[in-house]
Structure formats: C-alpha cells, structure tokens
Image (tube, coloured by chain):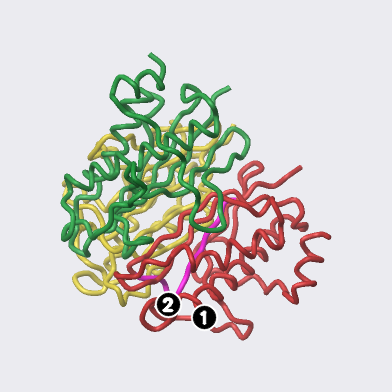
Chain colours: A green, B red, C yellow
Amino acid sequence: MTPEQKLTSLGLVLPELPKPVANYVSYKRAGDMLYLSGQGPRRNDGVMHTGKVGKDVTTKQAYEHAKLVGLGLLAAMRQATGDLSKVEVIKVLGMVNGVPEFTEQPAVINGCSDLFVEVLGDKGRHARSAVGMGSLPMNITVEIEAVCRILP
Amino acid sequence: MTPEQKLTSLGLVLPELPKPVANYVSYKRAGDMLYLSGQGPRRNDGVMHTGKVGKDVTTKQAYEHAKLVGLGLLAAMRQATGDLSKVEVIKVLGMVNGVPEFTEQPAVINGCSDLFVEVLGDKGRHARSAVGMGSLPMNITVEIEAVCRILP
Amino acid sequence: MTPEQKLTSLGLVLPELPKPVANYVSYKRAGDMLYLSGQGPRRNDGVMHTGKVGKDVTTKQAYEHAKLVGLGLLAAMRQATGDLSKVEVIKVLGMVNGVPEFTEQPAVINGCSDLFVEVLGDKGRHARSAVGMGSLPMNITVEIEAVCRILP
C-alpha cells in the first residue's frame, strides 16, 4: 500500500498547505534534505487549537492536536515531492505550549510520531526531541517542525 | 547588486562576529551545509538587548532586535564563506524570550527573515519556526540560529 | 589516544543507550549526517535528575547533569558508528529547564560541550544554541540533542 493509499484507508485527507503567516516558506530543500517549517494544529475550518497544555487542554486532547500537525507536515512533504513514498522522516522537534509544571511532552508529540509511522512505515521512524515552550504563536497548543530526506 | 552592495545601500555594516561566550564555535561546516550558532541582539557598543517581550519590550522593538541578530548571522555567513552571494538560507529557528501569554513570535522573527530576503534575495527565503522560550541567556530578548547551504 | 581510550583515562564509561520513552528512535542517519534524539540526565541507576534550574537545582549541579547527557549522546554516537573517532559533532541544541529568570544556560550546557571537546578533540567542537525551556519531559533539568557528521 502506498502512503497515499494508507491515508485513504485511515479516512484521512491531507489538508491544503496553510499559507505561512509571515516572511518564510513552508519547506525548503537542500540537496536531498527537506526542511519543514513549524506548523500548528489547524482544523479543517482553518481554526487553530489554542491553550496551555496541562491547564486549558489535556494531554489526550493535545495528542490529537499533534496528529493534526503531523497531517499538515505530511501535506508539506507531499507538495515538496509529489510522492510520499519518496520521503523518509529524519528528525522531529515537537514543541508543546505547556504550563511550567507540564511533564508529558512525549505523550503529546506521539500524536505526530504515531501518524508518521502509520502512514510511512519504517521510513516514518525518526530521531526526536519533545519539549515544552514558554509560549507559542497565537497561543497554539503544539508546534512541530521536521527534517526529512528525499529518496531517489 | 551583490549582497555586500545591498548591505551598503541599506546603510548596514556587518558587525564583528561576537566571540562565543562558552566552549563552542560561531559556525560549523558539514559538506556544503553551514550550521550557525544561536546569536543574540548585540548593539554596536557590544551591549545586548534584554528583557521579556510582551512586558519589558514591545513586539515592534523586538522586531528590531531580531534584525540585529540577523545582521550578526550574516556576519557569520560572510566569515564562513568570504562571499555572501554563495549563501542560501535553508532553515531558521527564531526563539523569543516572551512572557507565557506572548503570541506574536512570527512578527518578531520577521525582523531577521525580512533582512535575509532583502539582502540575499530569493536565496534568503527559508523554512522557519518562530517560538517562545521560557528563558534565554543573559535575559536577551531574542536568540536565532540558522542552517545554510553554501553554493559551489 | 582514541576517544574510547580518552574516556577510559577520564574514568568514564558509556552508559547503555536508554530506550526511547515513546514512538521514536535514539538516532537516525541521513547520508553522512547523524541526527541524535534529545536525551536527559540519566544516572547509572536509571533515575533522571529533575527540577527547575535556578530554583531546585544550581547552575553547577546542572553543569554535571549536562555532562551526563553528553555521555548518553556519546553512547548513541558510538552505537551508530561503532567507532567514536569517525564522529564529528556539528551542532548542539542545549535546552535547560530553568525558571523564567534563569540566565546561565551557556554555563549549564558547557557540561556537555566540554565533554565533547575533551573526548573527541577538535572534532568535538560544534555550533550551538543554549536556551531555556518552559518545561521538559518528566521535569528533567536538561535535555540536549545533536547533529553529527560521520567521517569516511
């Protein structure tokens, strides 16, 4: 099954790639490496999920937000390559807008990591850091960026 | 116009590359990739801009600080290559020392992104994350690191 | 002296590489680049050092924690290559779980940077950012990730 078929079988649809909110691009290629800009949890209606995880939002809710970010990152990979089977995820930086006492960043960012492995298989497995930020743009709950490799 | 001529036309002068404040180097090359250490907003007299954005410092002031950091990063690119026309900016991580409620990180980091595009043209366009930190060294307002590619 | 001999002369033993606490891998290779997942300060008995630096933990203590993280990262480099003399450290992102007023992140992350240079020599010198996070997994004091190059 191709990654695109896998998405369909999971009932998932890649979103329109959101327009960057400032003077940068959604992804940039350097040789066979692909750098993806950080994305937030955008719902289908364009509204972003906001709030501090550990206070306004639970870990379980934030897991779903991270999955939504993962879907946006897959959309960027797809637009950059035209074919998700050519993409290997190398490194993920998962940033959670948590309260200072929040400690479950890995459980949140799994929402994205699990999706990558589910859709891309072994090529979705990646090195990762999952950490807590002091604040995030628009008070979004989660922001995730990634480095990928494009296979020949 | 070369990037160096563009800088002159903008009335901008590349600063002396600041000496790293600890056991690391300002930049490191790996093949044709160039990794730049995080820099802070250093004025010409060597004093760093400090304070929490959203409380001690406004978004507009912090935009100017991010531009100052961008100038320092251009100085590092220039020292690493001897010729800014050989540099393509790939990825920027913009880190703002904001209060927990701060939400305008992209507007701050634009100070750096706008400068890169102004000086380097299309080669200055980059993937990016702009996020809020819990704290920064010496309480500086902004710290930015970048990954570049050196063209043959 | 090889890096492995240097470790022995310093009385240091590489730890078992900790099992990732979620759906990711400890390191991932892309061509000759090696991306290392963020690690925390794990003692020999498996217990992690926790607390906010600047309140529960001093800068000097956190320096030792960062050194412990560095040892874990060297263990990952060693497992990925089988030979530390083939590893060049390119970029380090050092993340400190500090209180909002904390300003000595560079002095903390030196614990890792000093170790890399001591064990790997000039190949241990790297570009770096040392910053303060809002929170970290399990409330660990320090988390550090790195990008390395594998020499032929």
- Residue type, label 1: Met
What stretch of residues is rendered in magenta? Answer: B135-147
Residue A152 at x, y percent in the picture: 58, 22
Which residue is pictured at 41% across the width and 48% down the height? A39
Q: Nearer the viewer, residue A62 or C14?
A: A62
Q: Where residue C90 appears, x then y in whole percent?
A: 53, 49
Q: Is residue B69 above or below residue B28?
A: below
- Chain for numbered disc 2: B
When asked about the image quadrant of residue A52, the answer is bottom left
Give the vertical position of B66 relative to A107 (above or below).
Answer: below
Q: Chain of mark 1?
A: B
Judging depth in this view, the residue of A31 and C121 nearest the camera is A31
Name the residue that disc number 1 marks: B48
Q: What mark, if any, has residue B138 been given in the picture?
A: 2
For marks 2 and 1, the one nearer the N-term is 1
Let me know if residue B19 appears in the view.
no
Q: Residue at x 30, y 19 (%)?
A: A9
Q: Is residue C1 above or below residue C98?
A: above
Q: In this rendering, is residue A130 above or below B106?
A: above
